Image (cartoon, helix red, strand yellow):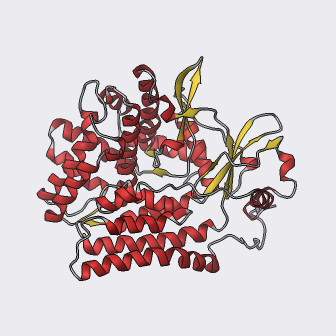
Amino acid sequence: MSDDDTPDSAPVPPRDSEANRLTARAARYARVGTKVGGVAARIAGMRLFGVDDHNGGNAAALAAALGGLKGPIMKVAQLLATIPDALPPEYAAELATLQNQAPPMGWAFVKRRMMAELGPDWAGRFLSFDKEPAAAASLGQVHRARAPDGAELAVKLQYPDMQSAVEADLKQLGVVLAIHRRMEPAIDTREIAEEIGARVREELDYRREAAHAALYADILHDVPAVRVPGVHRDLSTGRLLTLDWLEGGRLLDYVGEPLEVRNAIARAMFAAWWLPFARFGVIHGDPHLGNYTVFETEGRAAGINLLDYGCIRIFPPSFVGGVVDLYRGLQRGEEARIVHAYETWGFRGLSRELIEVLNIWAGFIYGPLLDDRVRSIADGVAPGEYGRREAFRVHKALKERGPVRVPREFVFMDRAAIGLGGVFLHLKAEMNFHALFEDAIADFEVGQVAARQGAALAKAGLS
């Protein structure tokens, strides 16, 4: 029996050898802190002596330092790169180039992990188990396996000492954000840091991810264009997650298909993201291209497989109400409703000048949803540049009229919307996004969202 399988009745739970250990944190601090600290000192020194980093050398140095490190710091860096104004544009551009894929752990590790989580007879619980991983990411790797009944499985194993690594890496990224706050006070990043920390820590808990998958299976059970894998709880623990293997092709393999096919995939993506949010207050906070594959029926793309459930954000129903209020306020030119929406999200002390700045960003995010016609998400914009021009305009205005503290609940909503827009740009989709959104929020009422959310969370075992 593994540590994660200890019965509740056990009087003294066994020691978790991979908990947040001081020795593991110290080793990680030594590796990460030296590289990040060196760049931080360089940045601070240049600012002390009034030297501007016109050529982006500090940004490149930070990317180079992080590029030699694997694990959660890569995930955190990439999260920061996709959150508008969390970092200066040159830093965001450099960090966005980093790859969060860690080198896979060998078969010796796999056997130790499987034995620790499922016991010494773990191999007998599978008909087959591939030694080589099918995918490797920042916190764990996935192996393809087969259940005794022949079902295809995706088995995700967490790398060792991840809890310690996460805590060490979050602390070091906090150093970078603190420097940014002192030098560029237009955006207060403290709640951004808290939100990223909370979400990355949640990703360590594979039992919670299993519950997230069950939640999405319930929410999207009547959406045939989106497939959610089933959870095999008897083969899952806190650091081992076994799901159905969903066969599909890479989303980018379909960018050359006819518009009709690309639009069908884009509609499935829209439903997978907006329906859970508008009706249940839940979003998939990591709209990375690798988290989706495309399934086919009769040789044609028919929808998407939603693969990863680590980064899921559950919002208070009132926050969803704020999103709809802002949409209606912009649609009808109702300033009071717009301000109320920002306040519902958690923005405080809003002056007219700051409201005008926020409206720049709101106009960008909501633009395709307000435009009642068939269109692309953003004509002529490269996927990697989506949102950067507007973020620069907002940052410039905030330097003159700020500062503003970004509420933590706004962070992943904003990031995910940008990521979803990037997917639509990759697909070159042309749709009536306004009609799709109006359908998603038809008969919207905050109380109904609260009721649906409460029932769904209870069914999935989430509080």
Apparent side of residue 69 relative to residue 184 in the rendered image (left or right): right
Quadrant where the C terminus sits is bottom right
Task: Give how far across and how far down residue 198 sits, in percent.
Answer: 48, 62
> What residue occupies the far top of the structure in this picture?
298
Q: In the image, is 8 to the left or to the right of 295?
A: right
Query: Would residue 409 be seen by someone viewing this image from the given angle?
Result: no
Q: Residue 324: where, in percent of width, then height? A: 30, 41
State whether residue 393 appears in this view. Answer: yes
Task: Decide: is 281 above or below 49.
Answer: above
Residue in view at x 67 percent, y 38 percent: 245
Query: Against 207, is 41 above or below?
Result: below
Residue occupying the point 51% across, 73% down = 32
Tell which of 289 and 366 is nearer to you. Answer: 289
In this view, the residue in front, 149 or 89, is 89
Asked which quadrant contains residue 424, the reply is: top left
- Identified at 78% across, 60% down, the residue is 108
Q: Relative to residue 398, is residue 296 depicted above or below?
A: above
> Looking at the rendering, in which quadrant would you find the N terminus?
bottom right
Residue 112 image offset from top left, x and y in percent: 78, 61
Q: Quadrant of residue 270?
A: top left
Q: Is 81 left, or right, of 133 in this rendering?
A: left
Where in the figure is residue 384, as x and y percent of width and height?
Answer: 36, 46
Nearest the camera: 376 or 238? 376
Instruction: Count every numbered label the image shows and give the total.
Output: 0
Quarter of the image where one finds residue 213? top right
In the image, taking residue 319 as reference, residue 25 lies left or right, namely right
Name the residue at 68% across, 70% down. 18
